Amino acid sequence: MQSYKQNHHAVRNEQFSNNAILITALSCLGGLILIIGATLILSRLLSHQEFSMAEAGQDQVVVMPPIEFSEGYSMILPSGFQQESKREYENGTIVYRFGGEERCKLTFAIVKDKEQNAFAPPPLNYTDALIKGVPELSQGIDGEIMAERVGIDGMSATLFRFYEKETYRGVVFTYYMVAMDSGTKLVVKITGKYGGYDEHATDISMPEHWYDSMLTLKHVR
C-alpha cells in the first residue's frame, strides 16, 4: 500500500513537472512571438518614417523656385548656388555667374550670333561648343567625350560631362551644355568639387543633381 502511494505520488509529480515545462515553453513561445511582432511593427514604422523623410527631401528639391532671367529664360539652380554677377558684352552676349559650395561655379550665357542659322543644330564636338571671346566658356578641358543629345523645353541641346580625380580632396567635375533657341546659343557650365574620392573605388559618384538642374532650363512664358 505504501509502495502504491509512493508510485502514485511520483506519477503526480511527473505530470506536474510535464505541465510546468509545457506552460513554461508556451509562455516562452508567446513571448518570442510578441517580441518578433513588436520588432516587425517597429521596423515598418521606422521604414515608413525614413521613406516619408526621403520623400519630403525629394519634394523640397523639386519645389525649389526657379531663378528667372530678364532675357526670358528660367532655371532651377542646384542647392547652395547663389548669383554673383552679370556681365554684358558688346556683341550682345550676356553671362550670369553663380557660386556654390566647395568653390563650385555655374555659368549661364545667352549668346546671340547674327550669322548663326536659326535652325542650326547644337555642336556635337566639345571644342566647337566652346564660346570664343567669353573667358568663362572658352577654356576647354584636355580631352574629348561624346556629346549627349538632350531635349530641353522644345530645344535641342548637347551635354558633355567630364571628371578629374583628386586624391583625398574629392573629385572635380565639369558639366557643359549648349542648347539652341532659334539661332541663340544658351550655354550652361557647372564646374567644381563634389563628393569624396577613394583610390580603391571602382565607381565615381557623379553629381546627378547638377545634371537634373541643367535640364530645367526653359522659356519663361
Image (spheres, rainbow, N blue to C red):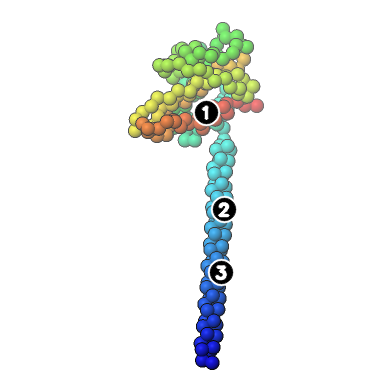
**Circle 3 — which element?**
helix
The first of marks 2 and 3 along the sequence is 3
Residue at 45% over, 23% down: 162
Measured as percent of width and height from the top left, residue 56 is found at: 56, 44
Residue 202 got which mark? none
Residue designated by label 2: 44
Residue at 56% over, 66% down: 30
Q: Quadrant of the N terminus?
A: bottom right
Label 2: how many residues lie within 10 Å, few (<14), some (14-19) or many (20+)? Answer: few
User: Picture quarter containing residue 113?
Assistant: top right
Residue designated by label 3: 26
Residue at 55% over, 50% down: 47
Whether pointer 1 and pointer 3 mark residues with C-beta atoms closer than 8 Å, the reply is no
Residue at 55% over, 16% down: 185
Q: Amino acid at mark 3?
A: Leu
The first of marks 2 and 1 along the sequence is 2
Work out whether 19 lies above or below 53.
below
Residue designated by label 1: 211
Q: Amino acid at mark 1?
A: Tyr
